[in-house]
């Protein structure tokens, strides 16, 4: 690092650098405060410069940047900001597009490169990309990054990626890019709920419910809504009603007010299914469930089982028995209780 005074002097000198060195600094500023050698080796040539690292070595000697064992980095934020302002917005956008074009093929197999690419995409902005295929590519890359960030519980990054992806969808996207739109909006529902952005989550839920082609395409969104209702203490009644509504669509119905006799009969019948040497052998050989409808039903039943532990306890044995029966008939699910 250097002092503010030295940084100010270097900033004034920046505009007098040779073109290739200035472009090297501009390129570096597109990545942020630093860029690794690993990334630079993927950029064979840049803006007509066939040896970008040589240009960066020159500006390192002039103390605009520092070269370490792994990367180049700006020595002061003042120089970084000056490099970002050294070209107009149109040229800067063209430079970032060129960088993305070089890096995208490597982002499919390297998560680090993928997140660098989606960061560049967000800086380019959807308003500066007009080719429909490119817009779809950028939206898909952001969806992929959002899923990976979600898997590591980095919901803030996932939210940024998914919202960026949505911004690249063109008018009429629910018709022209239906599957991609459904995945982006469904992912957005999950990450906004995880972040506690309930208003945004509800907006995305409406988008999915209003544009989905059928009930099956709403199930992911519906599960998140049910979980939200279940975890909101004063919404248990609504959660029960909503959960049973989903189950009815999945072919699993329950009595509105189960009688004690019905509950006893169901428990005894289910007990008979799982006792005895033959049945024990069958339990040990159960395979994984493959019926997607029954798998969804098991996930909803699990949510309602938790609800019934907190309220409406009369349904608890009926739900548990139903989960056992589905497991025996269709195979093991994540929520199977045997």
Image (cartoon, rainbow, N blue to C red):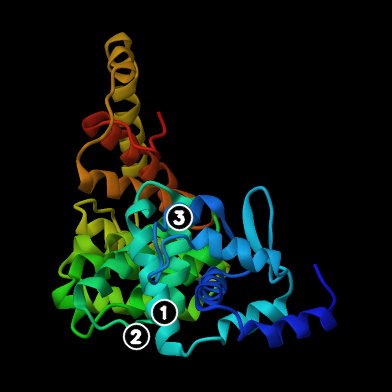
Closer to the camera, 251 or 97? Answer: 97
Is 331 situated above or below 113?
A: above
Q: Quadrant of residue 329?
A: top left
Distance between mark 3 and mark 1 Cα atoms: 17 Å
Q: Which residue is mark 3?
A: 113
| Residue at position x 24%, y 44% in the image | 294
Residue 215, image x and y in percent? 20, 64
| Quarter containing the N terminus | bottom right
Of label 3 and label 2, which has the lower sequence position? 3
Mark toward the start of the polypeptide (3 vs 1): 3
Q: In the structure shown, which secondary structural element does the residue marked by tag 2 occupy?
A: helix
Mark 3 element type = helix
Give the distance between the C-alpha atoms of the residues marked 1 and 2, in whole angstroms. Answer: 6 Å
Residue picked out by circle 2:
128
Looking at the image, can residue 236 be seen?
A: no
Label at residue 124: 1
């Amino acid at each position: 690092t250097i002092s503010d005074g030295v940084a100010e002097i270097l900033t004034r000198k920046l505009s007098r650098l040779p073109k290739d060195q200035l472009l090297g600094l501009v390129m570096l500023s597109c990545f942020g405060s630093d860029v690794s050698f690993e990334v630079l080796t993927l950029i064979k040539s840049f803006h007509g410069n066939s040896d970008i690292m040589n240009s960066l070595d020159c500006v390192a000697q002039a103390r605009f940047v520092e070269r370490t064992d792994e990367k180049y980095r700006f020595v002061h934020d003042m120089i970084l900001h000056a490099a970002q302002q050294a070209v107009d917005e149109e040229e800067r956008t063209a430079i970032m597009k060129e960088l993305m074009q070089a890096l995208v093929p490597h982002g499919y197999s390297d998560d680090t490169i993928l997140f660098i690419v989606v960061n560049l995409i967000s800086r380019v902005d959807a308003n500066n990309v007009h080719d429909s295929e490119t817009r779809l590519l950028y939206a898909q890359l952001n969806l992929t990054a959002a899923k990976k960030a979600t898997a590591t519980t980095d919901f803030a990054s996932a939210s940024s990626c998914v919202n960026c992806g949505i911004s690249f969808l063109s008018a009429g996207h629910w018709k022209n890019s239906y599957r991609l739109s459904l995945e982006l909006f469904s992912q957005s529902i999950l990450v906004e709920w995880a972040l506690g952005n309930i208003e945004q989550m509800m907006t995305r839920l409406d988008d999915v419910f209003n544009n989905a082609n059928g009930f099956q395409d709403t199930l992911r969104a519906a599960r998140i809504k049910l979980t939200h209702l279940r975890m909101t203490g004063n919404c248990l009644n609504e959660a029960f009603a909503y959960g049973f509504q989903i189950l009815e669509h999945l072919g699993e119905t329950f009595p509105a007010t189960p009688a004690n006799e019905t509950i006893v009969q169901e428990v005894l019948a289910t007990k008979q299914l799982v006792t005895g040497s033959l049945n024990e052998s069958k339990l040990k050989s159960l395979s994984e469930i493959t019926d997607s409808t029954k798998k969804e039903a098991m996930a909803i039943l699990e949510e309602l089982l938790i609800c019934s532990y907190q309220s409406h306890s009369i349904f608890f044995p009926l739900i548990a028995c139903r989960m056992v029966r589905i497991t025996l008939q269709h195979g093991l699910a994540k929520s199977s209780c045997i």
